[in-house]
Structures are given as structure tokens and as C-alpha cells.
Amino acid sequence: MRKITIFLGLIIAVVLSTSCEKVFMDKEISADAVNNFNTLADVIDKKYSYLVLKDIDWNSIVNTYRDSIHNGMNILEEFRIYDEMLYKLRDGHVNLYSGFDVGRNWEWYLNSPSNFDWNLIEREYLGDDYYISGGLKHKVIGEEDDKYSYVYYGSFSSGLSYIDFVKILGIKSKSKGIIIDVRNNGGGYLSNAEDFASHFVEKKRVGYKELLKSGPAHDQFSDTLTTYIEPLGEKWTKPIVVLTNRKCFSSTSFFTTMMKELPNVTVLGDSTGGGAGLPVDYTLPNGWIMRYSTTRAMDARGVDFELGVEADEYLNLDSKDVINGKDTLIERAKEIIDGET
């Protein structure tokens, strides 16, 4: 009897799950797909900031999909169409949020080497006696006359504190330089990126420049807005190497841009993933939320970094080094610092 009960229970579970899926797939329809489509198309056309820079023919994209949209269509198909359209913007800051999925484009890093292994860093470089100062994980690594301050900052959303403590430890231990590792840092608060860079700048410098989308024309922007960074805290003049990979995005690209202005800084690794536009949210008529970029950002020389901040020296993580307990980029950073001291 027990076996029969279990068997019947399984049958019921399968039927219910199949029915639920069928209801969702076949009966969840959009009553206003045409309005949703037209709204999405119009917002991107008039407010998205990178159509010109990326040479995107948005009108062509809209016309390609227009005939596929009709009221009463399945919402999964409707979502798929919008997702494909927005994917063509090639922007990690562009998303579409529904209750059942998030539209996104992550090809800006998925098609590149990861160049990062946290387990390697934790086990071979930091160990169990490193400092955790807010969002900073740091330690003086090396021995005797070959010491280096290593700092990992994994998210600019994490608290930024005791940067002077990091610098003072480096000074007292006679570190030759600082290795700032922001690999896999997907961004966060831009104010933290600005503060972090300000703790290493030696004089007032242009941090970055911005243009705000100011009208419906694709090339209609405000006058240039300039953000400056000024020295904060304990002075640091020794060499600095910033480690980057393609998964560095948004505020991390801003940080890398600002650090590249300093004469004692070398950016090592891969170009960042970009993400220089300030994203905002827009709610479509059906309640789905679309996020898109509304600004453009440039370095002090006017070079836009939406598609990434170039490294001064390109280097990939070597699998042979990893097997031998070495991070290729950290070891090269030591050599760069040695060559400048």
C-alpha cells in the first residue's frame, strides 16, 4: 500500500509541475506588448548615451523586431525579444528585470581569460594572518629586503577605511611599493573609488570627465563636467602596481582611470570591462524595470573608457605558475616595483 501511495504521489507531482509550467508558458500573456515595445524603443532611442560611440543602428534593431510584437503574446517570448534587443547595446549596465529573469550582457568579460584565482591568493599570499580593514584585505608580503604591501579590494560597495593604516604599515615595514589588486571588482560606489584614488594622488589632478545626456538626439549632451581628486592622508610616493582583469567594471574602471594619471602607477593585467555610463532605471508599462546608461565618461585626456581602460602592460595568469603556487601578475608586479626602486 505504501509503495502505491508513493507512486501516486509522484504521478501527481509530475502532473502538477507540468501543468504549472504549461500555465506559465501558454497562458501568461501580455495585454499590452505593443505599448511595452514602443516605450522601450523610444526610451533607448532618446536617452541611452552610447549609440553613437558604439555605432549602433537602433532604428534598424527596432524595425527588425517590430513585427514580432503583438498584444496577447506569451510573456516569455516578449521578454526574449526585449532581451535580444538590449543585448545588442553591448553594455553591462543595461538590464531588464522581470519576476522570472534578468536580461543582461556579460560578454564583456565572459569571452576573456579570468586571470584571477582567489584561492591561490588566500592560500599562497595572504594566509591566515592578513588584515581586514573594511573592504580591504591586505598584508605585507615577502621577506627581509624584498617586502611589498599587497591590498585586495573586491568591491567598491564595501566600506573603505584605514587606508592610511595600510600605507603606514608599508612605510614601517620598508615595503618597496604597493600592489593594489582590484581583479574581479565589479564596481560599487563611485565615491569609494574616488576616495581610494585620492589617498595615492600626490597633487590635485583631473580624475575623469563626464557628459550627461541632455536631449533626444543621439549626440545631444551637456557641457563637460570635470571631477578632480586631491591628496588625502599619509603621503605615498613609492611605486604602485594596479592589477586588473576584464571583470573590473563600472566604478573599478573609474578607479583605474584615475590611478593611471599618477606617475608612479603601472596598470598590469588586462583592460577593464568598462562600464563608464551612469545607469538609471525606467519602469515599462507592464512593470518590468529596464536599466540603461545615461552618461558618458572620459579620462583626463578625453578618451572614453566605456569599452574598457587599457592596461599599461598586458599579462595573463599562467596555469603553470598557478600549479606552482604563484600568481603570475603578483610576481610580475614585484619585478616592476623592483625596477623602479
Image: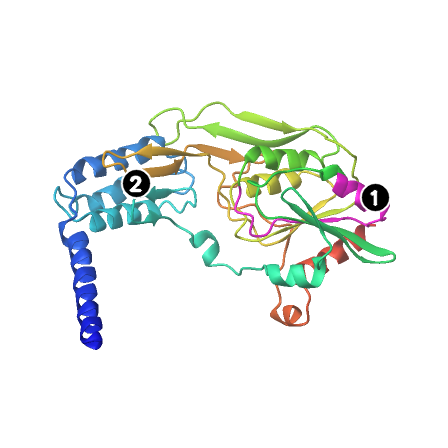
* Colour setup of the view: rainbow
- Mark nearest the camera among 1 and 2 is 1
Estimate the x, y position of residue 206 in percent, counting from the top left: 64, 30
The kind of residue tagged 1 is Ile
Q: In the current view of this chain or complex, which residue is farthest to the front?
A: 1
Q: Nearer the viewer, residue 70 or 303?
A: 70
Estimate the x, y position of residue 339 in percent, counting from the top left: 80, 54
Report the Cα–Cα distance between label 1 and label 2. Answer: 54 Å
The residue identified by callout 2 is 58
Q: Residues within 10 Å of mark 2 (few under 14, many from 20)?
A: some
Estimate the x, y position of residue 226 in percent, counting from the top left: 57, 26
| Residue 183 lies within the magenta run | yes
Q: Nearer the viewer, residue 245 or 326?
A: 326
- In this rendering, the count of numbered labels is 2
Disc assigned to residue 171 = 1
- What kind of element bears circle 1? helix
Q: Is residue 316 visible?
A: no
Q: Nearer the viewer, residue 200 or 60?
A: 200
| Residue 57 lies within the magenta run | no
- Seen in the image, is 321 located left or right of residue 221? right
Q: Residue 159 is drawn in which quadrant?
A: top right
At 53% across and 53% down in the image, what residue appears?
A: 246
Q: In the current view of this chain or complex, which residue is farthest to the right?
A: 145
Which quarter of the rendered picture does the N terminus lie within?
A: bottom left
In magenta, the rendered stretch is: 165-187
- What kind of element bears circle 2? helix
Q: Evaluate if marks 1 and 2 touch, with contact meaning CB atoms under 8 Å apart.
A: no
- Seen in the image, is 18 located left or right of residue 255? left
Compare marks 1 and 2 and give the one earlier in the sequence.
Answer: 2
Q: Nearer the viewer, residue 174 or 100?
A: 100
